[in-house]
Amino acid sequence: MARVTGIGGVFLRARDPKSLSAWYVKHLGITLSDYGGATFLWTDEVPAATGMTTWSLFPENSKNFGPGNEKGPQQAMINYRVDNLDELLTQLAAENIPIDPDRQSADYGHFAWITDPEGNRIELWQPLAD
């Protein structure tokens, strides 16, 4: 049987795609390609050998996606792997990026949440090094 083998892309709607792309470049260090999007290769893993993509469904009343915004409840959330969560949160706080005060740790890494200028809740994940 044919099957899905991974996540091929993440796509967000935006009121102002150029401006929102610039925000992600400036605050999350995403490098845009000539086509205007980003390509993350498995060789970009930091730390090495921690690369994975998780796909999961949540109940429609889940609080994990935050309260939503003027468009209504958020239907999707992106989880970005980061190399140094504490340092990134310090940088984001200095830029007045909204940061959820709730932080979580699990046996597979540390988590924090921020909100982009269009109200999208974003999960940041620093995997634990082996």
Image (cartoon, grey):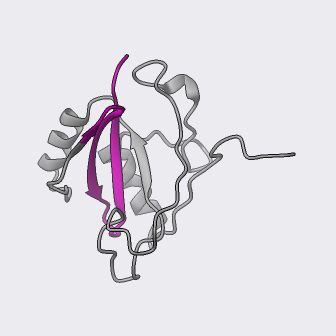
User: Is residue 110 magenta-colored?
Assistant: yes
* Number of numbered discs overlaid on the protein picture: 0
Which residue is pictured at 45% across the width and 18% down the height? 48
Residue 46 relative to residue 39: left or right:
left
Q: Give the image location of residue 5, x and y in percent.
A: 71, 40
- Quarter holding the N terminus is top right
- Quarter holding the C terminus is top left
Q: Give the image location of residue 16, x and y in percent.
A: 44, 69
Front residue (pair 66, 63):
63
As drawn, 47 above or below 103: above
Residue 57 relative to residue 47: left or right:
right
Residue 47 relative to residue 111: left or right:
right
As drawn, 81 above or below 114: above
As drawn, 52 above or below 12: above
User: Is residue 50 magenta-colored?
Assistant: no
Give the residues in magenta. Answer: 105-130
Q: Give the image location of residue 19, x and y in percent.
A: 40, 62
Front residue (pair 109, 123):
109
Q: Give the image location of residue 13, x and y in percent.
A: 51, 69
The prevailing secondary structure element of the residues shown in magenta is strand
Which residue is pictured at 55% across the width and 36% down the height? 40
Front residue (pair 93, 68):
68
Which residue is pictured at 42% across the width and 48% down the height? 79
Residue 78 relative to residue 90: left or right:
right
Which residue is pictured at 52% across the width and 44% down the height? 54
As drawn, 42 above or below 17: above
Residue farthest right in this picture: 1
